[in-house]
Image (cartoon, rainbow, N blue to C red):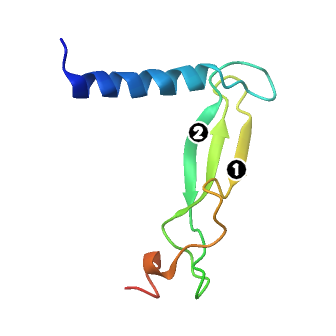
Amino acid sequence: MFNPSRMNVIENVTKKLINKINSYCPQCSIPGFGITDLKKGLACSLCGSPTNSTLSFIYSCQKCDYIKEEMYPHKKTTEDPMYCDYCNP
């Protein structure tokens, strides 16, 4: 009943649920607008090749099917060559 690691997991999931409930669709104003997918392919800063790092998040509404793409969600426009399959095989 008083398992600290379990309680931390429940706390984190509860916070995520609250954030999703408080996120409204810009088109139909229904709660639950959130990240449903992501696109990989952030460019390497050295060679420009796509990496496996996140390029964008895809948000969608389950009611009206509105979709929004947020580019560079981690505020990075290029990735370190350390994560590039071409520069660092």
User: Residue at 67% across / 68% down in the picture?
Assistant: 77
Q: Is residue 50 left or right of residue 6?
A: right
Say which quarter of the image contains residue 2.
Answer: top left
**Of callouts 1 and 2, which one flags the residue occurring earlier in the amino acid sequence?**
2
User: Residue at 18% across / 11% down in the picture?
Assistant: 1
User: Residue at 68% across / 22% down in the picture?
Assistant: 63
Describe the element under mark 1 as helix, strand or loop: strand
Question: Which residue is the site of mark 2?
Answer: 35
Q: Where residue 70 is drawn, which disc sits there?
A: 1
Q: Is residue 42 left or right of residue 61?
A: left
Q: Nearer the viewer, residue 12 or 50?
A: 12
Asked if 46 appears above or below 71 in the picture, the reply is below
The residues tagged by marks 1 and 2 sit, at their Cα atoms, a distance apart of 10 Å
Say which quarter of the image contains residue 28.
Answer: top right
Q: Position of residue 54 (x, y in %)?
A: 55, 60
Q: Residues within 10 Å of mark 1 (few under 14, many from 20)?
A: some
